[in-house]
Every structure is written in structure tokens, then in C-alpha cells.
Amino acid sequence: MRLGRRDFGPSLDVLVVGLGNPGPEYAVTRHNLGFMVTDRLAGEWSLGWRSKFSGRVAEGREGDTRLALLQPLTYMNVSGKSVAAALRFYKLEPDALVVVHDEIDLPLGDVRAKWGGGLAGHNGLRSLRESLGTADFARVRIGVGRPERGERQPVADWVLRPFPSDVDVEALVTRGADCARAVVRDGVDEAMRRFNGAGPL
């Protein structure tokens, strides 16, 4: 079982990482959905944030599962340094990691769980692979889509822009949080069964 209760060694069972960028100018951008989801989970689980691992961490439980939420504040491109430090501290292997991130290769509002795989050009995932030496960890992918045809702007600029006013960001964050919670509670396979293929909001 990749995620779940461990009987010895680590002080946690699961580390849930939300990827994003620090600062108010990035707070409600597509690239910060990982932060938004982990903020939602911290509120639902009544967890308090504190500064650690060049980021913010909140520790608690979900049922019998000992967990921590982590938001690296190192900027997206070097998120791996913060995550690696947290894994070392908690004596966890990457297979105890759940990473929540935006995904341009999924339509807006399509949320899916996944184990391992490629990086899809995501700089946060690339940093994690470089720092951890592997990309084999659980992921919650939140679709943000791509720029429409005819829009001439780099993808990097697209993901750093706020959502249009007609997008229900709260519903998007809720679905992402529900998927992350399912991964923590029931594992990647069950979360995939419930969320993958459900389609956009």
C-alpha cells in the first residue's frame, strides 16, 4: 500500500504538498491552485500553519492518518528544496507524498488523481523530481486548460494570470480538495476511480 498507516520510523503517514508561488500578486492565479486547495484542507481539518522548511506547514490527523500540509514558499521553480527538507525531517519516502498542482493538459475543472508519470512541462514537478531523484509520487491534477486559439501568450504567462470572472474558482478548489482528501483516506486507485473521467465542472 503506497499511502497509509506506517507502524514505525516516520512521524507522519502522508505529506500533502500544494504547489504555488508566494505573494499577493500570485494568490488567485491558475498556478496557485495547490496553495488554494491546501488552504481549504487546513481549514476543514482545523490545522494551524507555521513557518518551516522554507515554507508553511500544518500538522494534524485525518481519521487515523497522521499528516502534514506543506506550501513551499521558495517559488514554484525550486519547490523541490522545501519538499525534500520536509521529507527528511519526517523520515518519509517520496511514496508518502501527495502533490496538488495545476495542469494545463486537462480542461478547466477536470480534476484527476495519478501516480507518477511525466512532468507535462510543469516546473514545480520538475523541481521535485530533481530534488527527490524520482517522480514516483501521488498527484492531484487540477485542470486549468490552455490559452484559446488565437491567443498569443506563453503558457508561463497564462498560468500566472488570475481566473476570468466567470470561472467558479470555489467549485474548482472544492473538487481539488475532495480529490486530495480521497487520496489521503482511500489511496490513489480509489481516488482515480471516483474522480478520473468525471470531466470538467
Image (cartoon, helix red, strand yellow):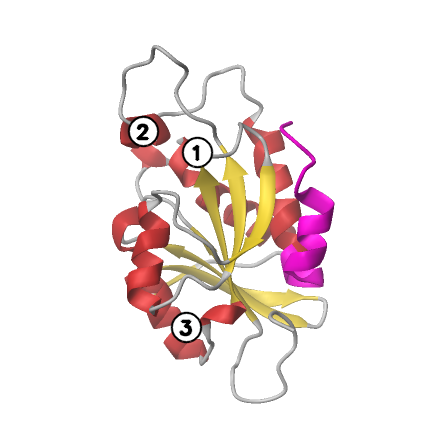
The amino acid type, in three-letter code, at marker 1 is Ile
Neighbor class of circle 1 (other Cα within 10 Å; few <14, some 14-19, many 20+) is many
Neighbor class of circle 2 (other Cα within 10 Å; few <14, some 14-19, many 20+) is few
Cα gap from disc 2 to disc 1, whole angstroms: 8 Å
Cα gap from disc 3 to disc 2, whole angstroms: 30 Å
* Observer able to see residue 75: no
- Determine the residue positioned at 31% across, 47% down: 123
Query: Which residue is under mark 1?
Result: 104
Query: Is the Cβ of the residue at disc 2 closer than 8 Å to that at disc 1?
Result: yes
The amino acid type, in three-letter code, at marker 3 is Leu
Query: Which residue is under mark 3?
Result: 87
Q: Position of residue 70 (x, y in %)?
A: 44, 59
- Determine the residue positioned at 66% across, 46% down: 178
Cα gap from disc 1 to disc 3, whole angstroms: 27 Å
| Nearest to N terminus: mark 3 or mark 2 | 3
- Determine the residue positioned at 68% across, 58% down: 189
Q: Which mark's residue is nearer the viewer, 1 or 3?
A: 1
Viewed as shown, does residue 182 lie left or right of 109?
right
Q: Nearer the viewer, residue 79 or 129?
A: 129
Viewed as shown, does residue 140 lie left or right of 22?
right
Q: Nearer the viewer, residue 168 or 183?
A: 183
Which residue range is magenta in the image?
183-201
